[in-house]
Amino acid sequence: MISQAVVLATVACWMSAGTAPEAALSGVRARVQPSSTQFPLNHPVWVQFSLENTNNDVVTLTVPGAEPQIPPPEMGLPLSHVFSGGSSSAAGVVLSTEGGRHWDEPVKYRSTNQAPILLLGAHSTAGATLDLRDFFPALRSPGQFRVTWKPYGGNLVSESAVITIAPRKQVEIVTDDGTMLVNLLYDDAPQHVANFLELARTGFYTGKTFHRLEPGYMIQGGCPRGDGSGIRLDGKRLPSESNTRPHEKGSVSMALLDDDPDSGSCQFFICNTRQKDWDGRYTVFGQLVGDESFLTLDRLMSVAVDEHGRPQRALYLRTVRLIDAPTDASP
């Protein structure tokens, strides 16, 4: 723990040296990282703001225009440092839209005349995660928004992060054997849901097939090559989002390559029975709902397969489309 005497000595040295803000920030990087790129309407919009010190020495950070104060014993990134934009960008966090609208003065936050200093250790990071809806009410409405961070009077500027706020969606998978409706588990697997929404929205799945069928157990599809070896065209992979959702009839999970937990991409499978061994191993991100969905699954599961588990007739995903989820849809 850093003693009060050390803190005071550090502040005194920093102030007496007359170091310019931009010089003090040399080697410090500002980052903005939302927990997802897609957020359902009326749900928290979690965004992490972090500072990375790439220097070999401790960096002393103070808020422009505020009297430096001794920091508390336990401290991440104080709000006064997050919102330290000054005259260059109001409070430091800028929210904007493609249409040109922007907001740079957060509600429920007022700058103070005093702010704790931040001693950022060599090659270390300090951060804070905020629900940005608390500071920018515009995020309580649908739309696409760009978040840019310009702390310390604008002497640091992060790369922008783009997030979309939209009503919750369900996914309809239309096949020659019927239609399956998937309720998406936004809260349990947000990155997998955002990935599935993106692929469905862009038409990626249209015309693909269910290429693998294990009678009684599951059916798998979404491969761009049609043989189980393909991934997204951009090569994107998803980190595991292990959750407590059980693998049961109608569960929709992300398929993995070589059983690598962080290799999820575009292929998914739908369970036809309870599979306890798959719990926590694969990420469940959706659940079939409605009688028609389960009747369609039963029809698909009844198709004959060869010795390699390939259906003996092509099982096409004719259309995979998004529809608005009802407000009372079960999570």
Image (cartoon, rainbow, N blue to C red):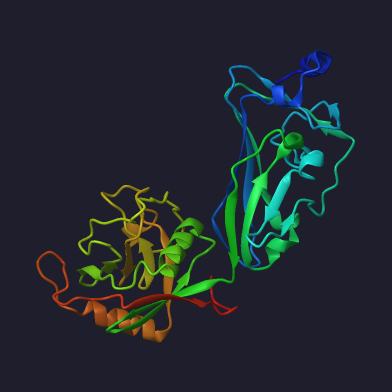
Q: Is residue 131 left or right of residue 315?
A: right
Residue 114 or 28: which is nearer the viewer? 28
Q: In this view of the protein, which residue sits in the foreground, 244 or 44?
A: 44
x, y percent for residue 291: 40, 85
Instruction: State which quarter of the image contains the N terminus.
Output: top right
The x and y percentages for residue 20 are 76, 22
Q: Residue furthest left?
A: 307
Q: For the view shown, which residue lies furthest in the front direction?
A: 100
Image point 90% across, 35% down: which residue? 113
Q: At x 70% / y 40%, what residue is drawn?
A: 150
Q: Is residue 91 above or below residue 223?
A: above
Left/right placement of residue 168 relative to residue 91 reads left
Q: In the rendering, at what x and y percent does residue 204 appear?
A: 36, 66
Location of residue 122 (image quadrant):
top right
Q: Quadrant of residue 213?
A: bottom left
Q: Seen in the image, is 191 located left or right of residue 277?
A: right
Q: Nearer the viewer, residue 312 or 216?
A: 312
In the figure, residue 97 lies in which quadrant? bottom right
Residue at left 30%, top 75%? 317
Q: How many marks?
A: 0
Residue 192, placed above or below residue 319? above
Question: At 67% from the left edge and 34% from the top edge, which residue is drawn?
Answer: 156
User: Is 121 above or below relative to 328?
Assistant: above
Outermost residue toward the right in this view: 113
Residue 22 falls left or right of residue 217: right
